[in-house]
Amino acid sequence: MAAPLLKNLNMPATFFIVPGWVSVFPDYLTWPEVWLLSQERDTIRNSRLFHIGSHTMYHPFLEQMANQMSSQDYQTFLDEEIGESRDWILDVTGQNKLFLALPFGDGANNKKIIDTCKKFGYTGIRHSIWNTITQSTLNIWSIPSLPILSFTEIEVIDDWLD
């Protein structure tokens, strides 16, 4: 729904997708739609208008899962969630850069998650911890964002922007 509006404004955006949901759920994107989004061009710079980012393969709580399995099983789990998601997205879009958005913001600054993203060639990680970024403290592996959900009130957005 947002893509046509953004396209009309020539406004770049990143869509973080869950590949395990693509073409599975009726109201979710299909792989042809993901490809089409990734092909939109900025009319001024002739660069990609939209990027597709990863929201992991199936959108689990990443850090919480560490408490439920051995260290080796946890690494296998991260490899599947982070690596498989990357493979699907890059295969369909042909992009050469990819960010991960942590599901639920879970796992910000987690060394195993960061190392797994680096191993699979990610460019950075986006999380949901507020007020953690300034120009002098920018860490590409820990970029905060504001999750906007159906129940998010406008005051929350106003506070974030202040």
Image (cartoon, grey):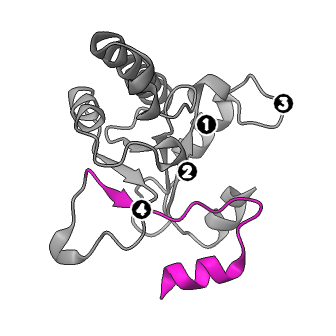
- Asked if residue 151 lies in the magenta stretch, the reply is yes
Q: Residues within 10 Å of mark 3 (few under 14, many from 20)?
A: few
Q: Earlier in the sequence, mark 2 or mark 3?
A: 3
Q: Can you give x and y, in whole percent of width and height, for residue 16 in the image? A: 53, 45
Q: Residue furthest bottom?
A: 162
Front position among marks 1 and 3: 3
Q: Which disc is residue 26 wearing?
A: 3
- Asked if residue 113 lies in the magenta stretch, the reply is no
Identify the magenta region: 141-162
Camera-side residue of 156 and 124: 156
Does the residue at mark 3 contact the one at mark 4 (Cβ under 8 Å)? no
Q: Earlier in the sequence, mark 4 or mark 1?
A: 1
Q: Quadrant of the N terminus?
A: bottom right
Q: Amino acid at mark 1?
A: Val
Pointer 1 residue:
34
Camera-side residue of 41 and 84: 84
Q: Can you give x and y, in whole percent of width and height, for residue 63 in the image? A: 40, 35
Front position among marks 2 and 4: 4
Element type at mark 4: loop
Q: Amino acid at mark 2?
A: Glu
Q: Amino acid at mark 3?
A: Pro
Q: Residues within 10 Å of mark 2 (few under 14, many from 20)?
A: some
Q: Can you give x and y, in whole percent of width and height, for residue 116 in the image? A: 27, 28
Q: Which disc is residue 129 wearing?
A: 4
Element type at mark 2: loop
Pointer 2 residue:
40
Element type at mark 1: helix
Distance Cα–Cα, label 3 vs label 4 = 31 Å
Q: Is residue 94 left or right of residue 60?
A: left
Distance Cα–Cα, label 2 vs label 1 = 11 Å
Distance Cα–Cα, label 1 vs label 3 = 15 Å
Camera-side residue of 55 and 97: 55
